[in-house]
Image (cartoon, grey):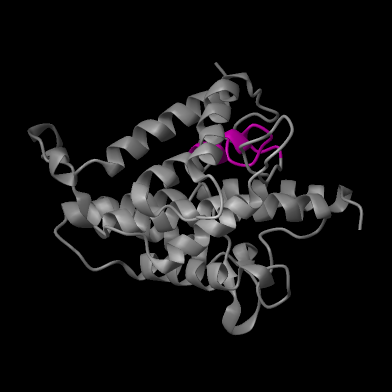
Amino acid sequence: MTLFAIHSRILLVLVVGLLASPKGWAGDELSDWKAGQAGKYLDERAKSWFSFSGANRGEGVTATTCISCHTLVPYALARPGLRKLAGTETPTEYEKKLFAQIKRRVENWKDLDTAPFSLLYDFSDRKKKEAWGTEAVLNAFILASGDRYQGKTLPSDLTNQAFKNLWKTQVLAGDQKGSWDWLDFQLEPWESKGARFYGAALAAIAVGMMPLSSKSGADVDTEARVKAAPRLSAQRALRAKPTQPSLGPLGFDETRRRLDERRAEEHRRSPP
């Protein structure tokens, strides 16, 4: 089994657990586990990422932070559940910051490839295409998750707009039909060739978190289009071969340093 397949299965298990009712987590076997302390740890990780200058995108009042699969995506999934376990309903400072930044980028989607906003990566046409697809999936996934945790019976207008952006960037033909272009820095498992199947799985989960009667994209056959995403992920994920060994348990700072080095190297190799 490939490293990507292992991580994909772990992710699906975690997502199912996080989307379950938090009340079901309060058994005796967890009596020594402190949800509040776990939440504080995640807050520190989010704080570190938001303060990392290499993750900055855009400039001035429209500046934001890169949505990271390894930090902010799991934070957006786990933090609301931990708050409920700790008896806290008010979103944390970093939850609010994350959603405010996503709101800004979703509302200004057509302007992301400009200096005030900036795509996640824009140093080549290939990376721009990957950036559009990756961000479209992550925005829809996080916003749909947020609507679910808030108990909304209909998706917010912002979530609907995020899904419209999602469908605009979905690959509709060829071998990758049903998936989305995904950032590839040869970094398993999040930023690699096989990670596009991880992205397709996130998109399918995002659709599943929306009320069936109100999925965005009334001008397209939504159900038919999204069927391709989970099928692509399920059939091909196990065949996706890692192109780079995992970084392993190096610690946050060392991992971040290596990521920066690899991205800088690809930037140097890319044509102007």
Furthest toward the bottom, the residue is 61
Q: Which quadrant of the rendered structure holds the N terminus?
A: top right
Q: Is residue 157 magenta?
A: no
Q: Quadrant of the C terminus?
A: bottom right
Relative to 161, is 201 above or below?
above
The answer to which of 264 and 125 lies nearer the viewer is: 125
Above-or-below relation of 260 to 11: below
Location of residue 186 in the rendering, given as x and y in whole percent from the top left corner: 70, 37
Give the answer, above or below, for where 247 lies relative to 1. below
**Front residue of this view, candidates 256 and 200:** 200
**Can residue 186 be seen by looking at this rendering?**
yes
Say whether residue 257 is visible.
no
Residue at the spot 15% in from the left edge and 37% down from the top edge: 30
Which region of the structure is painted magenta? 186-201
> Quarter-wise, where is residue 199 in the image?
top right
**Image point 72% across, 37% down: which residue?**
173
The answer to whether 179 appears left or right of 126 in the picture is left
Count all numbered tags in the image, as a single digit. Answer: 0
Residue 145 appears left or right of 112: left
x, y percent for residue 177: 66, 35
Furthest-top residue in this view: 1
Query: Horizontally, is 71 left or right of 262 in the view?
Result: left
Query: Going 20% across and 64% down the picture, which residue do you hit?
Result: 89
- Name the residue: 63% across, 46% down: 170
Image spot of residue 201 (x, y percent): 50, 36
Residue found farthest to the right: 271
Q: Is the residue 240 above or below the residue 115 in the image?
A: above
Q: Position of residue 9 (x, y in %)?
A: 44, 27
